[in-house]
Image (cartoon, helix red, strand yellow):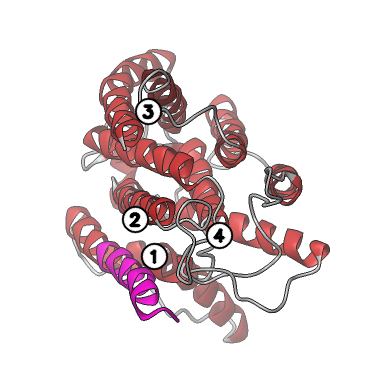
């Protein structure tokens, strides 16, 4: 538990202090956000706001995790060396962050609203996702447990059947692409994605602590969880919660900095990694209800536009821009969407806990 608290505290300080320094550096270099002309006109005032703030989140999480491990190494709270789950989760986090960084850098250096070509971005996500998935199903511990399994899960694996390896790899890629792009679509208003992600990571702190206390390896029983390295995952979840919360100080309206694709792709991808490692893949639809709703609004808008030959369901997609065009103030939309996101997270945690209590 001490390592979890240390990771969260240091990550929080890292983004609170580090983001202020990053803003100065990015402004000095002229690394400002470009605004699409087809977006809400109110966003044109944000042109030039520093972007790539996701780098601060990534660095803060890595440093906080390392400090938490070092600080507890010679105490009774020692959690041991970095686990396979932690290494792979941080690889996924940093790998997708690197793709996002390239995307952001190209936008800035080429002075255009589009960065990496869509094919290049997809290829990058596939390469990182496949490397993560293959290692996760191959890396066994002393008892033969792998980081993720071949089963699909809700609050634990559905028993009795397993996915073929090829299908599993495709499932992992779909989850990673879905969550990373979901956070990316949500990151359209000041603080919206950052605040929502903070709540999701907070939920995974609770889930991982609970699974650690009720783990089959240490506390076998009919309701125990066959999850590998839950305590180490809780440390990373705490670091992510603290880092996003600290970054929100500078990212809340009016934003002094944006996380960019560097932050949104890495945050979205690591959420998928948590879902797979904690055996809560389908439950993720509830926990990330806000991200799901915003992503669904884009899919519905595009599908209806094509089927109806030019008609639209929303005035603009993603969903938050629809309410902007209805005349809602940006801060009103953000706070109300945070409330919706919080209710989704609470509902997901309630389902998770109810399943354990009910023993289904």
What percent of the width, then of the height, locates residue 315?
38, 72
Badge 3 is on which residue? 50
Of badges 1 and 2, nearer the viewer stands 2
Nearest to N terminus: mark 1 or mark 3: 3
Label at residue 203: 2
Badge 4 is on which residue? 226
* Distance between the alpha carbons at the discs numbered 1 and 3: 30 Å
* Distance between the alpha carbons at the discs numbered 4 and 3: 43 Å
Residue at 54% x, 55% y is 227
Please say if 25 is above or below 251.
above
Of badges 4 and 3, nearer the viewer stands 4
- The answer to whether the residue labelled 1 contacts the one labelled 2, judged by CB atoms less than 8 Å apart, is yes
Q: Nearer the viewer, residue 55 or 141?
A: 141
What percent of the width, then of the height, locates residue 55?
46, 28
**How many numbered badges does the structure rendering display?**
4
Magenta stretch?
Answer: 342-360
Label 1 sits on a secondary structure element that is helix
Label 3 sits on a secondary structure element that is loop
Of badges 2 and 3, nearer the viewer stands 2
* Distance between the alpha carbons at the discs numbered 1 and 4: 21 Å
Q: Nearer the viewer, residue 192 or 324?
A: 192
* Distance between the alpha carbons at the discs numbered 2 and 3: 30 Å
Residue at 21% x, 43% y is 253
Q: Is residue 316 visible?
A: no
Nearest to N terminus: mark 2 or mark 3: 3
Q: Main secondary structure of the magenta part?
A: helix
Badge 1 is on which residue? 287
What percent of the width, then of the height, locates residue 56?
41, 26
């Amino acid at each position: 538990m001490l390592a979890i608290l240390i990771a969260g505290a240091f990550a929080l300080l890292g983004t609170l202090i580090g983001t202020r320094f990053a803003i100065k550096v990015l402004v000095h270099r002229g690394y400002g956000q470009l605004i699409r002309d087809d977006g809400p006109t109110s966003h044109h005032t944000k042109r030039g706001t520093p972007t790539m703030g996701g780098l601060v989140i990534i660095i803060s999480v890595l440093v906080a995790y390392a400090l938490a491990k070092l600080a507890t190494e010679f105490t009774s709270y020692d959690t041991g060396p970095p686990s396979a789950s932690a290494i792979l989760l941080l690889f996924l986090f940093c790998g997708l962050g690197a793709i996002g960084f390239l995307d952001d850098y190209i936008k800035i250096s080429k002075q255009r609203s589009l960065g990496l070509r869509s094919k290049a971005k997809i290829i990058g996500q596939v390469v990182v996702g496949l490397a993560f998935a293959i290692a996760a199903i191959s890396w066994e511990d002393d008892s033969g447990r792998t980081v993720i399994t071949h089963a699909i899960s809700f609050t634990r694996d559905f028993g009795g059947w397993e996915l073929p390896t090829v299908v599993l790899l495709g499932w992992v890629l779909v989850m990673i692409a879905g969550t990373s792009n979901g956070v990316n679509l949500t990151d359209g208003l000041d603080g919206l994605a950052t605040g929502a992600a903070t709540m999701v990571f907070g939920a995974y702190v609770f889930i991982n602590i609970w699974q650690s206390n009720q783990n089959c390896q240490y506390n076998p029983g009919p309701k125990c969880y066959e999850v590998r390295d839950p305590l180490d995952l809780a440390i990373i979840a705490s670091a992510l919660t603290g880092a996003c919360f600290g970054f929100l100080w500078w990212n809340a309206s009016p934003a002094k900095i944006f996380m960019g694709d560097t932050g949104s792709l890495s945050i979205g991808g690591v959420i998928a990694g948590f879902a797979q490692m904690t055996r809560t893949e389908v439950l993720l639809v509830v926990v990330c209800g806000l991200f799901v709703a915003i992503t669904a609004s884009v899919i519905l808008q595009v599908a209806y536009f094509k089927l109806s030959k030019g008609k639209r369901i929303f005035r603009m997609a993603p969903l938050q821009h629809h309410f902007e065009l209805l005349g809602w103030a940006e801060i009103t939309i953000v706070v109300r969407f945070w409330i919706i996101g919080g209710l989704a997270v609470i509902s997901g945690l309630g389902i998770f806990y109810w399943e354990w209590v009910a023993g289904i």
